[in-house]
Amino acid sequence: MPVVSREVRLAAVPRGLPAPADLELTEAAPLPAPAPGEVLVRNRHFQVFGGLRTLLGGGVEGTPVPGLRPGDTLFGPAVGEVVAAPDGGPLRPGDLVTHLLGWREYALVPAARCAPVDPALPDPVAHLTSGSAAYGALTRLAELREGDVVLVTGAAGGVGSLAGQIARLLGAGRVIGTTGSPGKAERLTAELGYDAVLTGGSWRDGASAEAAFAKELTEAAPDGVDVLLDNVGGHQLTAAVDAARPGARFALVGALSGQLAADTAGATGPATVDAFRLIVKGVSLRGYTGVAHPDVEAEWTERLAGWLRAGAIRLPLTRYPGIDQAPRALQELTRGDVFGTVVVDLSDPAHD
């Protein structure tokens, strides 16, 4: 040691959606040996997630994570192998761990901020999926019940591609999704078990799509919706409120209609909802964050392991090989070109 590592930094605040030119792949200063309480981790995989758009745009007021400024290294969930650790610590070389310092080949991480990879999951990459958010929202906020009609907006994303499957496994009677792509809609029904997928009112199409989406939702759920897991906001949330059945439970996980809007900083998600309908129908409308439900992660991992062993759930992934592909991965994610969880693969067979 020391170890030289490449990492992806913010070169400039994006004007609109992030492009590869807004990021730069650089060689970091040599990393020293870990100090007491630290470990050196060689990252194998890291997740690329839509929330980075908000962090890159500087619109992070009120969120639990810091924004990014030019020169900062991006971050996000990662799985890696401990390659060096001081004697006497809880982690040893060879241990696989998760942490939040992705977007770099090697990371010096406080040991207290690493979590050992659960061997119950057959593929460590499963730790990078967004299933815990979907599971937590459906069990803690929506309290999904047997036979519920469930609507998942943004169903082809990292959360949505698992939310529909989880809803079915928890007893939903009918599961409806939304996406802007007919090709993705076909995959959601053929591969992931959605009963119907709405494509006529993409949030990217603006105000002109509102009526089309509302009509399509009425046709797919003529008796209304019991549960909403919302990743989109905007007019899709508006229509879902209008379609709510008495006692419906709505869990808001994302706001992609604002977060990935090219003409904003990605820090707002405006939507118009009928407050009168919420009152008279007794609809609950709550936002979900993982930090508010710290017990969910372990429960989700246990349930996921069982479902994987039974062949009851799939983990849709879009993989990009090599850290040099990470800027492209972010661009294609924010553009809506990917399916499922987006992962950059840094594994080197020569070292594994």
Image (cartoon, rainbow, N blue to C red):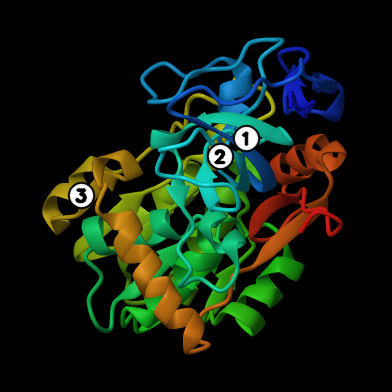
Q: Are marks 3 and 2 in contact (CB under 8 Å)?
A: no
Residue at 30% in and 64% down: 299
Q: Nearer the viewer, mark 1 or mark 2?
A: 1
Number of residues whose C-alpha sits closer than 10 Å to that of mark 2, classed few (under 14), some (14–19) or many (20 or more): many
Circle 2 residue: 257
Quarter of the image for the C terminus: give it.
bottom right
Q: Nearer the viewer, mark 1 or mark 3?
A: 1
Total of numbered circles in the picture?
3
173 relative to 349 in the view: left or right: left
Towards the viewer: 340 or 254: 340
Residues under labels 1 and 3: Cα distance?
27 Å
Number of residues whose C-alpha sits closer than 10 Å to that of mark 3, classed few (under 14), some (14–19) or many (20 or more): some
Circle 3 residue: 278
Q: Position of residue 64 (x, y in %)?
A: 38, 26
Amino acid tagged 1? Leu
Towards the viewer: 148 or 317: 317
Q: Nearer the viewer, mark 3 or mark 2?
A: 2
Residues under labels 1 and 2: Cα distance?
6 Å
Circle 1 residue: 260
Q: Position of residue 137 (x, y in %)?
A: 32, 56
Residue at 59% in and 40% down: 207
Hey, which residue is sitting farthest bottom in the picture?
Answer: 310
Residue at 51% in and 67% down: 162
Q: Is residue 114 above or below residue 61?
A: below
Q: Is residue 51 above or below residue 118?
A: above
Towards the viewer: 288 or 121: 121
Amino acid tagged 3? Leu
Residue 137 visible in rendering: no
Residue 189 visible in rendering: yes
